[in-house]
Image (spheres, rainbow, N blue to C red):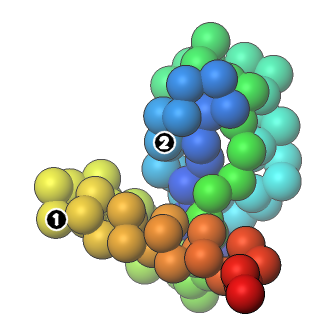
């Protein structure tokens, strides 16, 4: 299994999109400065993830989310995910 994941910087709110087979380990790498692309921008938290059977599928989805059209879709996904997590108001 492979995952496409979106991390949100707790300090700046910036997003990072990547793929990995072990997202928990990858989050740790980002938070401990092992990943150069996200170094000095954390701490990071999970904002969204998707599961794929193959690495090829995950890489295709990651590239799409990093494109202009994909960023718009990502914003919609994050809003939907946020609404699912927050309790309904009466």
Q: Quadrant of residue 36?
A: top right
Q: Looking at the image, can residue 1 be seen? A: no
**Dot 1: what SS?**
helix
According to the image, label 1 marks what residue? 69
Whether pointer 2 and pointer 1 mark residues with C-beta atoms closer than 8 Å, the reply is no
Q: Quadrant of residue 2?
A: bottom right
Q: Say whether residue 83 is left or right of residue 61.
A: right
Residue 42 or residue 90, whichever sits in front: 90
In the rendering, at what x and y percent does residue 27 appear? Answer: 76, 43
Q: CA–CA distance between discs 2 and 1?
A: 15 Å
According to the image, label 2 marks what residue? 15
Q: Quadrant of residue 12?
A: top right
What residue lies at 37% left-to-right and 62% top-to-bottom?
75
| Figure disc tally | 2
Can you say whether 40 is above or below 66 in the image? above
What residue lies at 48% left-to-right and 69% top-to-bottom?
79
Q: Please, which residue is most extreme toward the front here? A: 90
In the rendering, at what x and y percent does residue 52 appear? Answer: 57, 83
Q: Say whether residue 61 is left or right of residue 1.
A: left
What residue lies at 48% left-to-right and 42% top-to-bottom?
15
Position of the C terminus, as image quadrant, is: bottom right
Can you say whether 63 is above or below 57 in the image? above
Residue 34 or residue 46, whichever sits in front: 46
Position of the N terminus, as image quadrant, is: bottom right
Q: Please, which residue is most extreme toward the top here? A: 40
**Dot 2: what SS?**
strand
What residue lies at 50% left-to-right and 66% top-to-bottom?
78
Can you say whether 78 is above or below 23 in the image? below
């Amino acid at each position: 299994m492979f995952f496409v994941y979106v991390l949100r910087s707790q300090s700046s709110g910036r997003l990072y999109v990547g793929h990995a087979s072990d997202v928990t380990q990858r989050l740790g790498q980002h938070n401990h400065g092992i990943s150069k692309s996200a170094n000095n921008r954390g701490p990071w938290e999970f904002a969204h993830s998707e599961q794929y059977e193959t690495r090829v599928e995950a890489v295709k989805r990651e590239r799409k989310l990093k494109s202009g059209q994909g960023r718009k879709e990502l914003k919609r996904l994050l809003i939907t995910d946020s609404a699912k997590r927050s309790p309904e108001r009466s």
